[in-house]
């Protein structure tokens, strides 16, 4: 009666079983080497769930972001630039517009007001060395407010602000090098956004 025989019934045709168990030492060495190879490879693995993995870095907008990322920080930073058509920011109309823009940015629900920066915010300060040690203050003096009744700044007021801007080392960062414009910087906080904490960038951009 025909049936299925074992490998012993066919000595001329060694089975895989015979090869493995006939060379146990060699097989164990091979498996040990493979295991060591996997361990060595596993030691180089790194988890990278970074922000860049979620970005279409080939898009022209993202390429611009990458070019200036080192200077301006993360993708949730917002910059509002105001340029004076006359090429000189030191006039009543410009500073009125800049203060209004600063307050408008602060009022955006998704913006952290404490991280808003412009020449009008208290976190933009200057420090200088004087005879008695160190002195400092806000770039915009406390008595300078475009919303104050009868606001009418003098040339001396603007000269003081210009000097403070230079002392604060914000020329080229918050204020243009040729004093033709200035910026309001803000940071969007996802946790403060409505409806589950997701930022609607298009809606924010329209405000």
Image: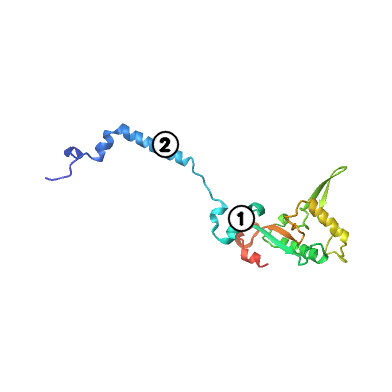
The foreground one among 103 and 61 is 61
The picture places residue 90, in percent across and down from the top left corner, at 81, 62
Name the image quarter holding residue 2.
Answer: top left
Label of residue 67 in the image:
1
Cα separation, mark 1 vs mark 2, equals 42 Å
Colour theme: rainbow
Q: Residue furthest top?
A: 25
Answer yes or no: is residue 104 visible.
Answer: no
Determine crowd level at label 2: few under 14, some 14-19, many 20+ residues with C-alpha closer than 10 A. Answer: few
The picture places residue 80, in percent across and down from the top left corner, at 70, 62
The correct choice, above or below, for 35 with respect to 128 in the image is: above
Q: Secondary structure at mark 1?
A: helix
Q: Residue at x 73, y 63 (%)?
A: 82
The correct choice, above or below, for 206 with respect to 24 in the image is: below
Q: Residue at x 87, y 61 (%)?
A: 155
On screen, residue 104 versus residue 53, left or right, reads: right
On screen, residue 47 versus residue 104, left or right, reads: left
Answer yes or no: is residue 70 visible.
Answer: yes
Q: Residue at x 51, y 45 (%)?
A: 46
Label of residue 185 in the image:
none
The foreground one among 105 and 92 is 92
Name the image quarter holding the N terminus.
top left
Determine crowd level at label 1: few under 14, some 14-19, many 20+ residues with C-alpha closer than 10 A. Answer: few
Question: Pointer 2: what residue?
Answer: 36
The correct choice, above or below, for 27 with respect to 199 in the image is: above
């Amino acid at each position: 009666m025909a049936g299925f025989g074992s490998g012993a019934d066919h000595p001329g045709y060694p089975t895989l079983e015979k090869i493995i168990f006939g060379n146990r030492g060699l097989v164990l060495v091979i498996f040990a080497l493979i295991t060591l190879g996997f361990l060595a490879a596993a030691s180089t693995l790194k988890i990278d769930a970074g922000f860049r993995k979620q970005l279409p870095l080939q898009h022209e907008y993202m390429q611009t972001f990458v070019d200036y990322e080192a200077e301006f920080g993360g993708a949730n930073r917002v910059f509002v630039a105001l340029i004076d058509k006359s090429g000189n920011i030191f006039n009543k109309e410009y500073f009125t517009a800049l203060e209004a823009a600063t307050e408008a940015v602060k009022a955006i629900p998704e913006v952290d007001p404490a991280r808003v920066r412009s020449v009008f915010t208290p976190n933009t300060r200057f420090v200088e060395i004087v005879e008695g040690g160190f002195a400092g203050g806000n770039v915009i003096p406390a008595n300078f407010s475009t919303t104050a009744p009868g606001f009418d700044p003098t040339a001396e007021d603007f000269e003081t602000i210009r000097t403070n801007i230079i002392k604060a080392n914000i020329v080229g960062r918050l204020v243009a090098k040729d004093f033709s414009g200035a910026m309001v910087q803000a940071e969007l906080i996802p946790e403060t956004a409505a409806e589950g904490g997701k930022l609607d960038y298009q809606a924010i951009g329209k405000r």
